[in-house]
Amino acid sequence: MTSHPRQQRLFSFDFIALCLLIFFTYCNTTVFYSLDVYLGQLGIGQQWRGFLIGSSALATIASYLLGSARMTVRSAVPCACAGALVFLACGAGYLYARSPQELLALRLANGVGFYLLSASVMTQLVRIIPPERSGQAFGLYSVAILLPYSVVPAVFDALAGESGSLAHGYMVMSLFLVPALALILFMHVKRGRDQAEAVHSAPMNFRDMWANAARPPVALLLGIMTLYITTFSSVFFMAKGFFQARGFEHVGMFFTIQMLCMIVVRLLGNHLFDRVRKVGLIRASFALTAASCVLAALARDLPTVYASALVMGLGMGVGTPAMSSLVFSISEPRFKAVNSNLATMAQQLGGFFGPMLGAVAVHHFGYTGFLALGAASCVLALALCEVFARKRMDRRP
């Protein structure tokens, strides 16, 4: 990959704009933290809710599998525009969808829209990241992803309570894609059509992509990232029901504490991600997250639950930047963009398994079941991290 002088500077207009774009994108996924409750208000049984919630991630996974090899700098702009338009259409659709079939269609379309936007942003991002500052870059980028998680649930807890207002809330949040669409077009006009970059980001074939993904360091790290988001998404989508079952209020505050803690950790420690062995940070992340799940399961009052949110925030605060930076570091130059997109696909796989398995655990074991699932996922991830570290798979190619 050709090195450009501007790639040595992290805080460029493009980097800030891409962080804004991913912020707007995640505003339109975090708004569905209440979807489990909303589906119940529509009369949809518990056995179907996990699938409907996770079907969005399933569509995203399929899109990444089919499209990652073909996504290039040149195709990123039209794909991002298409993704924004899909989100806008889906937002309006929630005002009318009531049946499981209609909601499934909307969730699948949401997943495709998320792929189009997130893969486009990631393809552009890896082009401008200075290799020696990848940990800091992904740390700051992940802050833009976390901000919606810390703000959206708290705001919606305060403003939306009835099923009708939830549907209107989903529609209103989709309007954030209007400024995102304008930003995409402005970036495109500002940068123009750089043919040299288009050549260097020519699409690869699927055989090359899968041969690269099958390399033990890449495959194992993708598995670890899947377990990470399985835990995260299970907690995110099941927590509101957990709060209601325990007679607690203000589930939004749980996420605010957790996310703000993660943001603080990433802002204060972003230089650390490039100086400390990343696999050690990942192990610490899973150990703390497992402890937080156990603490929440044992909680009988709000202070204890909020303490578990704090511990989870500390653990997950170092997780994503370390894993994303490690994917970037262990990838050969021509595979950096596709591996970063495969890492996002792995996260979406966790986003599918999390609510699905979480709903099954709740159905059979009550609301402590999804917390036990989270702790078990973390223990398995710790075992995989041990293999990764012992075989020193974190060495650069």
Image: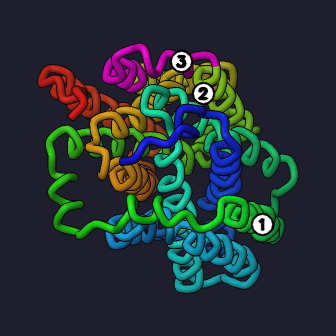
The kind of residue on which mark 3 rests is His
Residue shown at 67%/54% (left/top)?
21
Identity of the amino acid at label 2? Answer: Met
Residue name at image x 35 percent, y 55 percent = 338
- 44 and 184: which is toward the camera: 184
Q: Tag 3's secondary structure?
A: loop
Res 179 → quadrant: bottom right
Determine whether the residue tagged by mark 2 lies in a helix, strand or loop: helix
Q: How far apart are the alpha carbons under marks 2 and 3? A: 15 Å
Dot label at residue 182: 1
Tell me, for residue 262, which label it has, or none. 2
Please provide percent x and percent y for residue 162. 81, 63
Element type where label 1 sits in the image: helix
Residue at point 50%, 42% (across, down): 4
Q: Nearer the viewer, residue 188 or 113?
A: 188
Residue 271, disc: 3
